[in-house]
Image: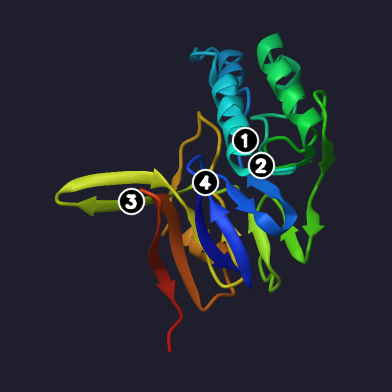
């Protein structure tokens, strides 16, 4: 895990697109999009039906790695509100085991506003924890510390003529947008105007990611002086 500072305290980036909050012993993830493949299958587009298993395996690894006692998910947990009803028995068992082992809170998103916690956990629209607001989509004008998801930010850089694209978080002094955690999720350029607008007000906005055990931090936007 790679430590970094946000909103006046220490956090840690994991290698699995999650953020660990030591003070709360909490793992925070966004945009799992469980059962995305089965959703597309109902619309005639066939994809390998193992995305939920892969995402849950990655989530179990992050919980073991961090020792998290709590898990907060920042919306779009399922690709649609009925997604939990389509979980096959193995994936459902994996999820039930994870929600039994931790204090688990589902925050709903635009894809799953009416989801139910069939396999455990508590469902809320948003949540305040230790002075930090947790929600799916960054709220315009928010001035307090906020964690959100929704945009699936990705860092795009060119190194020696090679284009590298990888999930990243986007952070300002008081706000942070997490990368999509799900295995079957695309992404948006971290410097996209929609992301930069969602982060306002801010003095500076950076992309942050963990690479080779170190924090990678690249500036995306700076306020005019």
C-alpha distance separating marks 3 and 1: 29 Å
Q: Which residue is mark 3?
A: 156
Residue annotated with mark 4: 14
Task: Pick whichever of labels 4 and 1 is earlier in the sequence.
Answer: 4
Task: Describe the element under mark 2 as helix, strand or loop.
Answer: loop
* Quadrant of the frame with the C terminus: bottom left
| Label 1: element kind | helix
Single out the mark in the foreground, 4 or 1.
Answer: 1
Quarter of the rendering containing residue 91: top right
Q: Can you tell which of label 2 and label 4 is closer to the viewer?
A: 2
Q: Which residue is mark 1?
A: 64
Disc 3 and disc 4: Cα gap in Å?
19 Å
Q: Residue furthest bottom?
A: 225
Q: Is 26 on the left-hand or right-hand side of 171?
A: right
Q: Which residue was labeled with disc 2?
A: 67
Give the Cα separation between the discs numbered 2 and 3: 31 Å
State yes or no: discs 2 and 1 in contact (Cβ < 8 Å): yes
Q: Residues within 10 Å of mark 4 (few under 14, many from 20)?
A: many
Q: Position of residue 118 (x, y in %)?
A: 82, 24
Q: Earlier in the sequence, mark 3 or mark 1?
A: 1
Residue 76 makes an appearance in the image: yes
Label 2: how many Cα within 10 Å (few below 14, some 14–19, many 20+): some
């Amino acid at each position: 895990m790679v430590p970094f500072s946000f909103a006046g305290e220490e956090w840690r980036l994991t290698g699995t697109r999650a953020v660990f909050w030591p003070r709360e012993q909490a793992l925070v993830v966004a945009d799992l999009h469980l059962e995305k493949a089965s959703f597309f299958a109902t619309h005639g587009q066939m994809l390998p039906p193992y995305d939920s298993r892969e995402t849950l395996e990655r989530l179990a690894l992050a919980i073991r790695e961090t020792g998290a006692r709590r898990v907060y998910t920042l919306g779009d947990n399922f690709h649609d509100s009925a997604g939990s009803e389509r979980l096959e028995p193995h994936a459902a068992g994996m999820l039930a085991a994870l929600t039994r082992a931790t204090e688990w809170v589902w925050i709903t998103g635009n894809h799953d506003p009416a989801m139910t916690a069939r396999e455990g956990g508590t469902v809320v629209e948003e949540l305040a924890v230790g002075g930090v607001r947790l929600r799916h989509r960054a709220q315009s004008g928010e001035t307090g510390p906020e964690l959100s998801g929704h945009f699936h930010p990705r860092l795009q850089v060119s190194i020696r003529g090679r284009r590298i694209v990888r999930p990243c978080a986007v952070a300002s002094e008081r706000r942070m947008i997490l990368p999509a955690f799900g295995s079957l999720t695309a992404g948006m350029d971290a410097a996209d105007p929609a992301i930069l607008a969602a982060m306002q007000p801010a003095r500076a906005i950076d992309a942050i990611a963990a690479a080779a055990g170190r924090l990678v931090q690249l500036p995306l936007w700076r306020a005019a002086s």
